[in-house]
Image (tube, rainbow, N blue to C red):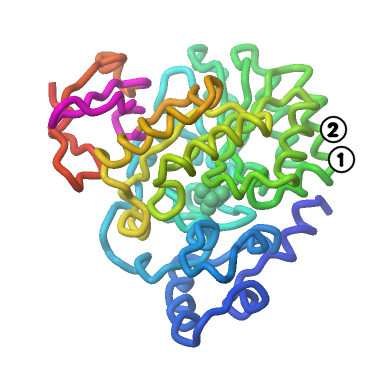
């Protein structure tokens, strides 16, 4: 049995399991029961232990405990157009050089802000099931030079499955980089630091192809000594670690907290990669989105408190048309630039767009030429 299977058994998946960690009223428990019929609950004891139970607005709590607003029928299920980019079951080819694989619908914890809320924890219809077919597609598209194994959480797979992915894709001549999208360094770092088998698999294949972990620390309190240790152990295996945070209301929508987060990520040994604007996801947008003009100001102020390495991220919207970088505000307008575009003609395009107060996302009409 892999370490993940052992650790997963300890996860809290029902409301009564929260009792040792939170003081919830009867009404709160009833509401959570309602929500998890639709969007399941799963949290590691380690992550629950990071919550300050005396703070009703605790940011760690907000990230992992269901909120009644998840019930509001406002938002979309697939905000990045993932279905339209799927070329083999479970594998998407949106950007020329990259394929993304939904390797599982399982995670160590289910984040309340997840943009794949439509599938994590309950629906396996979109999950990859034919590794050979995916490898064949990648092999016949020589423009592809890297694979992002995502999910769910890529490290919520058994070690044997992780090894299969590495074996298959490291053998392809056109692949120079394999990335794993995982929040396990944040929510279950022991799955890395106490799993010698996983570490030795990563070390072995890291000699054949560059490996990377793309993780998601969203609050400085997540950067614990356990998380630091897991990152260090990945680095010692030759796996580099990058962080993709999401700007989230009530979690990190404060310049000082955001600066602490990015400086902390750097000191832990990871490289800040992106800060994502929270997507207009069903069950997420009302609870977590911050208006674009506000988030742009927060990031501008936060940058002044970050060291040079911590400032190395891009603030982007992951839009169906591409990754759109938010450059900043100028008068009543905002400036955006395609950092990565689905269509070649958009590559690098700069746009000046009037953004009303309260607007949290770009509509297709905003992006017309
Ligand atoms: S670990 Fe990733 S895929 Fe899983 S719930 Fe969190 S954000 Fe979603």
Reading the image, the residue beneath label 2 is 200
Residue 196's disc number = 1
What secondary structure is marked by label 1?
Answer: helix
Q: Please rate how many residues cluster around mark 2, counting C-alpha atoms within 10 Å: few if below 14, some from 14 to 19, many from 20.
A: few
Marks 1 and 2, how far apart at CA: 6 Å
User: For this view, does 11 lie left or right of residue 82?
Assistant: right
Give the overall secondary structure of the magenta segment: strand
Q: Nearer the viewer, residue 205 or 35?
A: 35
Query: Residues in magenta?
Result: 317-340
Q: Is mark 1 within 8 Å of ligand 1?
A: no
Queried whether the magenta region covers residue 363, the answer comes back as no
Residue at 29 percent across and 29 percent down: it is 321
Asked whether 311 or 47 is in front, the reply is 311
Q: Quadrant of residue 336?
A: top left
Residue 82 lies, in percent from the top left, at: 39, 39
In the rendered view, tell whether residue 40 sits above or below residue 338.
below
In what element is the residue under mark 2? Answer: helix
327 in magenta: yes
Residue 70 image position (x, y, % from top left): 37, 65
Q: Mark 1 and mark 2 in contact? Answer it, CB < 8 Å.
A: yes
């Amino acid at each position: 049995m892999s370490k993940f299977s052992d650790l997963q058994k300890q996860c809290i998946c029902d409301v009564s399991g929260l009792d040792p960690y939170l003081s919830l009223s009867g009404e709160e428990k009833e509401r959570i029961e309602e929500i998890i019929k639709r969007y399941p609950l799963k949290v590691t004891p380690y992550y629950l232990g990071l919550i300050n139970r005396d703070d009703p607005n605790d940011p760690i709590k907000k990230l992992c405990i269901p909120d009644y607003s998840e019930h509001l029928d406002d938002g979309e299920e697939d905000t990045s157009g993932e279905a339209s980019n799927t070329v083999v079951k479970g594998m998407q080819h949106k950007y020329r050089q990259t394929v993304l694989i939904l390797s599982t619908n399982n995670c160590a914890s289910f984040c309340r802000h997840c943009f794949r809320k439509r599938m994590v924890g309950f629906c396996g219809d979109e999950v990859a099931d034919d590794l050979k077919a995916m490898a064949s597609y990648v092999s016949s598209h020589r423009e592809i030079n890297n694979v992002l194994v995502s999910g769910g959480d890529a490290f919520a797979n058994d070690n044997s499955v992780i090894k299969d992915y590495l074996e298959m894709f490291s053998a392809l001549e056109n692949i120079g980089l394999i990335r794993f999208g995982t929040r396990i360094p944040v929510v279950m770092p022991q799955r890395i630091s106490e799993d010698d088998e996983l570490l030795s698999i990563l070390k072995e294949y890291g000699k054949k192809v560059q490996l990377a972990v793309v993780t998601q620390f969203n609050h400085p309190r997540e950067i614990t000594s356990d998380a630091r240790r897991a990152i260090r152990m990945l680095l010692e295996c030759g796996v580099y670690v990058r962080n993709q945070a999401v700007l989230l209301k009530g979690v990190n929508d404060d310049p000082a907290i955001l600066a602490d987060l990015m400086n902390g990520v750097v000191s832990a040994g990871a490289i800040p990669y992106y800060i994502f604007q929270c997507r207009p996801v069903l069950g997420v947008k009302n609870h977590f989105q911050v208006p674009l003009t506000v988030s742009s100001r927060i990031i501008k102020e936060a940058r002044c408190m970050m060291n040079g390495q911590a400032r190395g991220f891009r603030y982007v919207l992951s839009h169906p048309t591409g990754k759109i970088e938010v450059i900043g505000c100028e008068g009543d307008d905002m400036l955006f630039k395609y950092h990565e575009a689905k269509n070649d003609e958009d590559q690098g395009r700069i746009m000046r767009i009037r953004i009303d107060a309260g607007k949290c996302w770009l509509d297709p009409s905003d992006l017309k030429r």
